[in-house]
Amino acid sequence: MATLRTIVTVVYVLICIALTILVLMQEGKSAGLTGTISGIADTYWGKNKGRSAEGKLVKATKILAALFMLGAIVLCMSWGY
């Protein structure tokens, strides 16, 4: 049981590091605000943001955030809290 807990903890730490890196790689929301005001939001990249590199970063961040929360719950239950 202790080996499994150690493996889950290591995976959790890796998820934490990856989540931090993904958040830091994303553009700030203020960069998109200027484009919206000047009318750039109607371009191809504005309409298809989910298919761009930024959209993929957002999706990966959401997935890692869900894994982060799930990992926190699993670790909390395994330590008996």
Image (cartoon, rainbow, N blue to C red):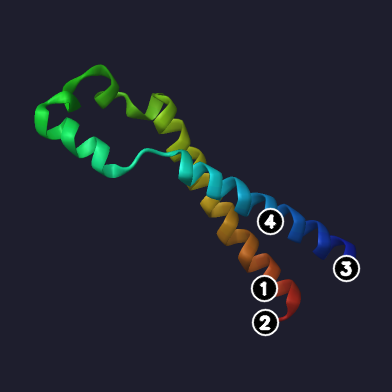
Q: Residues within 10 Å of mark 2 (few under 14, many from 20)?
A: few
Q: What label sits on residue 13 in the rendered view?
A: 4
> Can residue 1 be seen in this snapshot?
no
Q: Is residue 67 above or below residue 72?
A: above
Q: The residue under label 4 is which amino acid type?
A: Val
9 displayed left or right of 23: right
According to the image, label 3 marks what residue?
A: 2
Looking at marks 1 and 2 on the same chain, the residue that comes earlier in the sequence is marked by 1
Looking at marks 4 and 3 on the same chain, the residue that comes earlier in the sequence is marked by 3
Instruction: Find residue 27 and report its horizontal and vertical position in percent.
Output: 36, 38
Name the quadrant containing residue 49.
Answer: top left
According to the image, label 2 marks what residue?
A: 81
Q: The residue under label 1 is which amino acid type?
A: Cys
According to the image, label 1 marks what residue?
A: 76
SS at mark 1?
Answer: helix
Q: Give the number of the mark in front: 2 or 4.
A: 4
Q: Between marks 3 and 2, how big is the CA–CA gap? A: 16 Å
Looking at marks 4 and 1 on the same chain, the residue that comes earlier in the sequence is marked by 4
Name the quadrant containing residue 74.
Answer: bottom right
Q: The residue under label 2 is which amino acid type?
A: Tyr
Instruction: Find residue 10 and report its horizontal and vertical position in percent.
Output: 76, 56
Residue at 55% over, 44% down: 21
Q: Tell me whether circle 4 and circle 1 mark residues in contact (CB < 8 Å).
A: no
